[in-house]
Image (tube, rainbow, N blue to C red):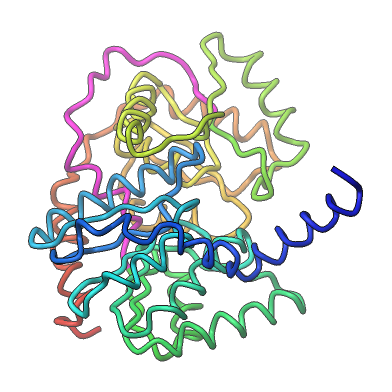
């Protein structure tokens, strides 16, 4: 490929990431692909990831379970993130007024993962006559000129939709959403992965062994260079020490999504302690009944999610990312404590039993 062709391809790809129009126009090739659903009541679950982040895959699994439990009269049609824009023309062709669109939850309302934000905005702008629900999300726009422009655009698009519900998964995002999305129904509810607790059987604590670290290595990493110092010290101090991550170097399509989530969860049940700055590292540790030291990431999502479960004695949140000696002493302390089992049934009844009524506007907030 010539240098000009390479530059042109790069430019087109960049423009498409910012607008989505090229991928949307390619949807004409998919006309008829969803024909089997034209006469049924449907929920279209869009933006489901398949790129190897098991925390995000757990969001899909828990969300689909919630939808099937609470909307049994609907067929739940899951569309992968990579296929979402190309599928919109076909969805537009068969969708009916009583159908609904649900969007993947997570931590990408804002500029941290702006490609996902633009896809969400594109969907919202194309389906103003259909009820849209964004599953529990965190919101964070950078505090600079570019972030302000993007927030203004997001605010305009979201507020132009007559029936858009946005669920914040922690109070910090909830406050930002309420301030900016004034024409939307904004709800506050824990991360949907906590709903996964209803699918988990009791774990066997006798099999636990070792300290597992689950630390970020991307733009949300707050440890930076200090992380390697910490990892070396943990490795020197603790004989049984394992480095893992909630991301895997492979795609995770529908066929293996549940197996990947359960595999990681089973791995967590084998640890004596999880040390993590990943939100779903903390959440999966909590669900597995595994003691966990949790640290903040770039935004407020880990702290905000921890506040839902701060009464769990085996989960501890630490803000001191620059004090490795304090972290090591905290690990020692956690390894030498006895902890109580947590009542997940009561947690789910409190936070998820009326979520459908709140989404449908039958409960005023």
The magenta span reads: 189-213
The quadrant where residue 75 appears? bottom left
Residue, far top? 239
Among the 4 quarters of the image, the one containing residue 234: top right
Q: Nearer the viewer, residue 7 or 124?
A: 7
Q: Residue furthest left?
A: 73
Quadrant for the C terminus, please. bottom left
Identified at 48% across, 70% down, the residue is: 173
Q: Quadrant of the N terminus?
A: top right
Residue at the limit of the structure toward the right, as seen here: 3
Q: Is residue 283 above or below residue 46?
A: above
Residue 322 screen position, x and y as percent: 71, 42
| Horizontal side of residue 279 vs 358, given as left or right | right
Query: Camera-side residue: 54 or 231?
Result: 54
Q: Is 364 on the left or on the right of 332, as rendered?
A: left
49 left or right of 110? left
The image quarter containing residue 358 is bottom left
Q: Position of residue 254 (x, y in %)?
A: 34, 39
How far from the left and from the top, in percent, is residue 337?
A: 36, 27
The residue located at (66%, 68%) in the rendering is: 18
* Camera sees residue 105: no
């Amino acid at each position: 490929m010539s240098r000009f062709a390479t530059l042109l391809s790069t430019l087109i790809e960049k423009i498409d990431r910012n607008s989505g129009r090229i991928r949307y126009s390619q949807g004409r090739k998919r006309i008829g692909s969803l024909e089997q659903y034209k006469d049924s009541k449907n929920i279209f679950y869009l933006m489901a990831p398949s790129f190897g982040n098991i925390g995000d895959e757990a969001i899909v699994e828990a969300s689909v379970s919630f939808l099937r439990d609470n909307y049994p009269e609907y067929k739940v049609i899951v569309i992968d993130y990579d296929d979402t824009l190309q599928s919109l023309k076909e969805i537009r062709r068969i969708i009916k007024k009583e159908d609904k669109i649900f969007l993947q939850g997570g931590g990408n309302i804002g500029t941290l993962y702006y490609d996902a934000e633009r896809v969400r905005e594109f969907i919202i702008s194309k389906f103003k006559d259909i009820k849209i629900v964004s599953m529990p999300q965190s919101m964070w726009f950078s505090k600079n000129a570019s972030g302000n422009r993007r927030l203004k655009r997001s605010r305009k698009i979201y507020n132009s939709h007559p029936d858009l519900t946005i669920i914040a998964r922690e109070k910090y995002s909830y406050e930002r959403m309420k301030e900016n999305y004034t024409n939307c129904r904004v709800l506050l509810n824990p991360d949907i992965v906590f709903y996964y607790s209803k699918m988990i059987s009791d774990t066997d604590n006798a099999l636990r062994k070792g300290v597992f670290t689950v630390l970020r290595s991307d733009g949300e990493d707050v440890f930076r260079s200090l992380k390697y110092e910490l990892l070396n010290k943990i490795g020197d101090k603790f004989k049984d020490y394992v480095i893992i991550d909630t991301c895997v170097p492979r795609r995770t399509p529908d066929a293996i999504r549940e197996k990947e989530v359960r595999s990681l969860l089973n791995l967590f049940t084998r640890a004596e302690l999880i040390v993590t700055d990943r939100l779903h590292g903390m959440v999966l540790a909590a669900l597995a009944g595994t003691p966990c030291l949790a640290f903040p990431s770039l935004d407020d999502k880990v702290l905000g999610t921890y506040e839902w479960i701060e009464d769990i004695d085996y989960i501890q949140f630490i803000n001191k990312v620059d004090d490795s000696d304090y972290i090591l002493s905290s690990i020692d302390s956690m390894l030498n404590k006895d902890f109580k089992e947590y009542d997940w049934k009561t947690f789910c009844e409190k936070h998820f039993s009326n979520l459908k009524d709140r989404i449908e506007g039958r409960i005023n907030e």
